[in-house]
Image (cartoon, helix red, strand yellow):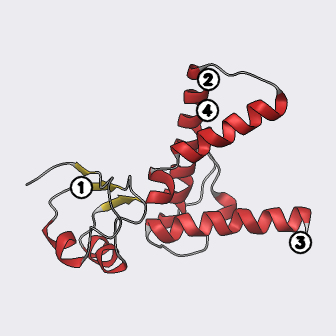
């Protein structure tokens, strides 16, 4: 079977090496947690199949939960349209930053700024997502310090 996009959205560990070898897709957008094994990642990378890793591909639920927390804390109410707009902007911006980290093409645009996250070499998308997360944690600790 051939498709433009595969969206593994049910179970973890389903795209292993042999499965990755048989996939006939241009892009995998991970909807499940951990649907691709490390061996599957290596095969997909070797085959130049693009990847939207789970850390960004299924981040909508936790992001909207954060928006609900913010609204409650501020005693605000956002419309569904506003929540969806904020979510779309956040996911697209984070995806672009992760893509720039992976390609080692740091840049500042109207929609995102990846200049402070570059590591000086190309990496796979999953590693780029981890780089972004760790650099954001580092920035927080540098600003706020460590707490007991």
**Circle 3 is placed at which residue position?**
146
Q: Is residue 104 visible?
A: no
Q: Earlier in the sequence, mark 1 or mark 4?
A: 1
Vertical placement of residue 83 versus 17, above or below:
above
Image side of residue 5 versus residue 54, left or right: left
Gap between marks 1 and 4 measured at Cα: 28 Å
**Do callouts 3 and 2 mark residues in contact (Cβ within 8 Å)?**
no
Dot label at residue 82 = 2
Determine which residue is flagged by label 4.
86
Label 1 vs 3, first from the N-terminus:
1
- Density class for disc 3 (Cα within 10 Å; few <14, some 14-19, many ≥20) is few
Which element type, helix, strand or loop, lies under badge 3?
Answer: loop
Distance, label 3 to label 2, CA atoms, is: 34 Å
Q: Is residue 66 left or right of residue 48?
A: right
Left or right: 80 as drawn, with respect to 11 = right
Q: CA distance from mark 1 to mark 3?
A: 43 Å
The residue under label 1 is 26
- Seen in the picture, residue 85 relative to 129 is either above or below; the reply is above
Q: Is residue 18 above or below residue 92?
A: below
Viewer-side label of 1, 3: 3
């Amino acid at each position: 079977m051939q498709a433009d996009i595969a969206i593994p959205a049910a179970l973890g560990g389903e795209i292993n090496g042999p499965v990755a070898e048989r996939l006939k897709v241009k892009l995998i957008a991970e909807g499940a947690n951990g649907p691709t094994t490390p061996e599957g990642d290596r095969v997909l990378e070797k085959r130049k199949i693009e990847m939207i890793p789970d850390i960004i591909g299924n981040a909508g639920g936790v992001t909207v939960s954060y928006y609900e927390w913010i609204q409650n804390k501020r005693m605000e109410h956002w419309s569904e349209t506003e929540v969806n707009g904020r979510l779309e902007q956040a996911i697209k911006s984070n995806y672009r930053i992760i893509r720039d980290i992976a390609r080692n093409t740091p840049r500042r645009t109207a929609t995102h700024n990846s200049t402070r996250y570059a590591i000086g070499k190309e990496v796979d998308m999953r590693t780029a997502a981890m780089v972004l997360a760790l650099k954001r944690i580092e920035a927080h600790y540098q600003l706020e310090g460590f707490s007991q």
